[in-house]
Image (tube, rainbow, N blue to C red):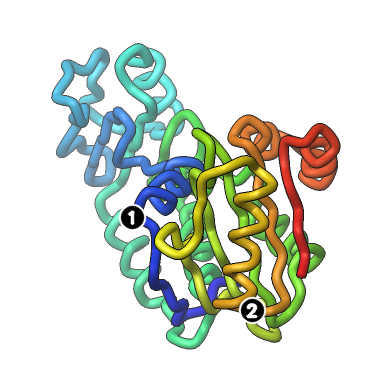
Amino acid sequence: MLGKDVLMEDIDIDQWRNAQDLLLESSKEKRRIIVLHDNGVVRKCEHTDGIEIVGKPTEITDAPTQAKELYENNKDNVDFVAIFERRAFDEYFSRMQQSWVADEPLDSFVHRTYALLDEYPTTMVTYPGPARETLGLQYRFGVTRNEAIVLANRWVRPNSSLLLGVYDEGGIWASLVMSFDSELTMVELTTVDAERVDVKGDLGEVTARAMEWMIENHRPDAAALVWTREAFDKFREAKNKELAVAAALANGAAVVLRS
């Protein structure tokens, strides 16, 4: 789980940006048609790139069906369609803000904000894909939140640090260094410090150097898993994550170290 006061410092901008590109997908970067209506009366229907929309609706009577039709009519120029009823839209954000609990793990709040979208199946509509899998920042690690918690409980020890890295272009190309407390709540998040660690070299060498730095500067109980970029892509798409890691280790496309 992600703690409410996660310490984030000494972040390498390049590694952080590359990690975000690998793991996060923003709906704001996608071409989209947004329809806003008041109980069926369309107030706004626009393409984010200002492109002419084929089959613009004048009223909304069946948002899920109309979202699909609007997408099919414009699929060469759009990534998704969103149809929002204005009062439902306002109510959703009000409920989301009111649900904030200061002492709860941050990821619990984020998970709840997306799950809440399921309560608006006809008034907060996207196509293709449901709103909870389309809007905002989507996490693209290939596992659900609950699956990630199960894997973390299996791979991560209490009061330890974990490095997940991607090796490309002759060095550590992206990384996340996470430290956990006794309850496996993440309390620190950073990257490998490229000013203190030589991140260039072969896969085994750079992983060993990063591991030594992590033990000295974070938790002495530490583990590192670094893939080649190709191996990470296969891991992300694999249904069985542990088998994917084992396969990458067997063919030399990943390195695992433990203190």
In the picture, the quarter occupied by the C terminus is bottom right
- The answer to whether residue 86 shows anywhere in this view is yes
Give whichever of 59, 113 is nearer the camera. Answer: 113
Q: Which mark is on residue 18?
A: none
Mark sitting earlier along the chain (2/1):
1
Which amino acid lies under the numbered mark 2 shown in the image of this protein?
A: Arg
Q: Quadrant of the N terminus?
A: bottom right
Check the image and report above or below for 240 versus 88: above
**Label 2 secondary element:** loop
Q: Where's residue 71, x and y in %?
A: 38, 21
- Which residue occupies the foreground of this view, 238 or 8? 8
Q: Secondary structure at mark 1?
A: helix
Q: Residue at x 49, y 56 (%)?
A: 114
Q: Is residue 107 left or right of residue 28?
A: right
Which quadrant of the figure has residue 98?
A: bottom left
Residue 5 picture quarter? bottom left
What residue is disc 2 on?
219
Amino acid type at image mark 1: Ala
**Label 2: how many Cα within 10 Å (few below 14, some 14–19, many 20+):** some
The percent position of residue 4, horizontal first and vertical second, equals 47, 80
Q: Residue at x 34, y 36 (%)?
A: 82
**Tag on residue 88?**
1
Q: CA distance from mark 2 to mark 1?
A: 46 Å
> Of circles 2 and 1, which is in front?
2
Whether residue 161 is situated above or below residue 248 in the rendered picture: below
Which residue is rendered at x = 73% and y = 47% of the image?
A: 255
Q: Residues within 10 Å of mark 1 (few under 14, many from 20)?
A: some
Residue at 61% across, 59% down: 209
Residue 204 relative to residue 60: left or right: right
